[in-house]
Amino acid sequence: MKPFAIAVHGGAGTILPHLLTPEKEVAYKSALHDAILAGEKILAANGSSLDAVEAAVKVLEDCPLFNAGKGAVFTHDETHEMDASIMRGDLLMAGAVAGIKNIKNPIQLARKVMENSEHVMLCGNGAAQFAKKMGFDFEPDSYFYTEQRHEQWKNAILEDKVALDHNIKIDEKKFGTVGAVALDLHGNLAAGTSTGGMTNKKFGRVGDSPIIGAGTYANNSQCAVSCTGHGEFFIKAVVAYDVYCLMEYKQLSLEEACRIVVKEKLVKIGGEGGLIALDKSGNISLCFNSEGMYRASVKSNEALFVAIYGD
Ligand code: ASP
């Protein structure tokens, strides 16, 4: 029987044991666990990888610990502007939203763009108009507020820095974006990513997460990829698509392709972060060049894996 598999991430960065209380560690791990279970349940019941990815990302968006949906970081103007994308590997269909406000689950709006519009990416006011047309509810700003993110924002404003994390101290870098990749029993791959971006981001800044090929990519012929890290570098390195290309054109294994992109090519240009990836046989790569990455995975024939720190 063909395997199913799913992996999720909740961001990468300087994640060190002494920076995380045991209670927080348990909370992060149990959120990752819940996200995996939400996706696994769908896959085990012969559901689609697209549904599994959406369900897993939604769990992480609803959890205030991660920088997506509830708990998204603050922009320079003390607002929340979120980005998300989703892609299905069988039809190469994709949907994305950028700079959206007040939407509880940006991943669901990205999917609507893919399925109910003739476009791939919608941003700002236009995306809001589309969300209204699709019947989405708008949450008040207070829904997205968390004290920790507000503290980070104050620190970032004081230091006049654009911070890449959801840490209290902005020089301890952590990227709290969330994402999922899945392979279903029909051999279909899918990937999705959702983020609040960077603390103190200005001028409508958009990172890699909603950009197909940079932060997210899925193609049944090789792999599904979701990234987290310093978005500007991930855009320049076209990270998710580069993993696919190394497999497609150079016949590299998933593991080798991810290693080259994350540990060699990104490192060379100073791009910190990581990715989760799955190939069509169900092999999983959870690869990062930072201290740690919130991550979890499960396969139909293997036990659940959850980890935070580097190995
Ligand atoms: N990649 C995201 C961005 O640059 C940040 C993250 O991964 O947390 O917007």
Image (cartoon, rainbow, N blue to C red):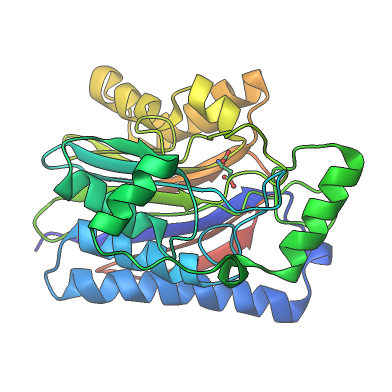
Residue occupying image coordinates x 48% and y 71%: 62
Q: Residue 208 location in percent, x, y?
A: 49, 34
Q: Residue 144 location in percent, x, y?
A: 59, 66
169 or 281, nearer to the observer: 169
* Residue 116 seen by the camera: yes
272 relative position to 83: left or right: right
Residue occupying image coordinates x 26% and y 24%: 251
182 or 248, nearer to the observer: 182
Residue occupying image coordinates x 44% and y 24%: 238
Q: Residue 157 location in percent, x, y?
A: 84, 44
Q: Residue 274 location in percent, x, y?
A: 55, 42
Give the farthest residue toward the right. 158
* Residue 263 seen by the camera: no
Q: Is residue 254 above or below residue 149?
A: above
Q: Name the image quarter holding the C terminus.
A: bottom right
Q: Is residue 7 above or below residue 198?
A: below
Residue occupying image coordinates x 55% and y 48%: 81
Q: Quadrant of ligand 1?
A: top right
